[in-house]
Image (cartoon, rainbow, N blue to C red):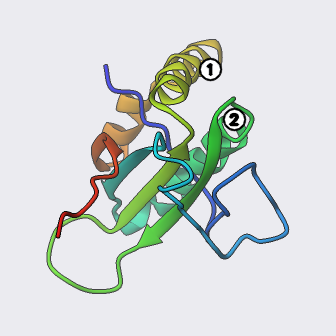
Amino acid sequence: MAVALLAVFTGCATVGPPQQEHPQMISINLEKNPDLRFRIDSFTVPDAAREPFEAAMRRNFAFIQTLPGFQGHVVFEKTGGPGRFNIATIAVWESQDAIDKAVTQVGAFYKENGIDMPALLARHGIQAELGQFSAVPLKD
């Protein structure tokens, strides 16, 4: 089962240890950190589901920012262009090992707290496309 690692904040966070002082920037240096991994999730969130969706994101962010290897996150809201998704999140992790452990820890967190994320998404008509990514260097 795919576990949605929802990163929340209505702005951005600096990549590196979580820093509350600079919530409006994200910086990714792949030369210095080639092992970075990214959880990129896209959501179609109906207007009526916005409040419960944001509440779930806040709850999840409060948890994932405490996990080892978490480097930062950003939440995007679509302002134009084709496609069905209107919210996208990117969570940055220091390595594949860190993101793998986070998936397990988030699953345990959901279970301990009685959270059924697939049911929550279905109940509110939210569609999700979830994925893990690594950066690909562009060749000349």
Amino acid carrying label 1: it is Phe
What is the residue that sits farthest to the right in this orientation? 21
Looking at the image, residue 105 lies above or below residue 46 = above
N-terminal-most mark, 2 or 1? 2
Q: Choose between 47 and 17: the one closer to the eye.
A: 17
Horizontally, is 99 left or right of 15 in the view? left
Looking at the image, residue 5 lies above or below residue 23 = above
Element at label 1 = helix
**CA gap, disc 2 to disc 1?**
8 Å
Looking at the image, residue 5 lies above or below residue 52 = above
Residue 9's label in the rendered image is: none
Who's the residue at 67% across and 63% down the image?
14
Residue 63's label in the rendered image is: 2
Who's the residue at 32% across and 55% down the image?
42
Element at label 2 = helix
Residue 132: x %, y % from top left: 34, 39
* Tags 2 and 1 touching, CB below 8 Å: yes
Can you tell which quarter of the image residue 133 is in? top left
Amino acid carrying label 2: it is Phe
Residue 52: x %, y % from top left: 53, 51
Q: Choose between 119 and 3: the one closer to the eye.
A: 3
Who's the residue at 31% across and 19% down the image?
1
Who's the residue at 44% across and 57% down the image?
89
Can you tell which quarter of the image residue 98 is in? top right
What is the residue that sits farthest to the front in this orientation? 140
Q: Which residue is mark 1?
A: 109
Q: Choose between 116 and 17: the one closer to the eye.
A: 17
Residue 118: x %, y % from top left: 35, 30
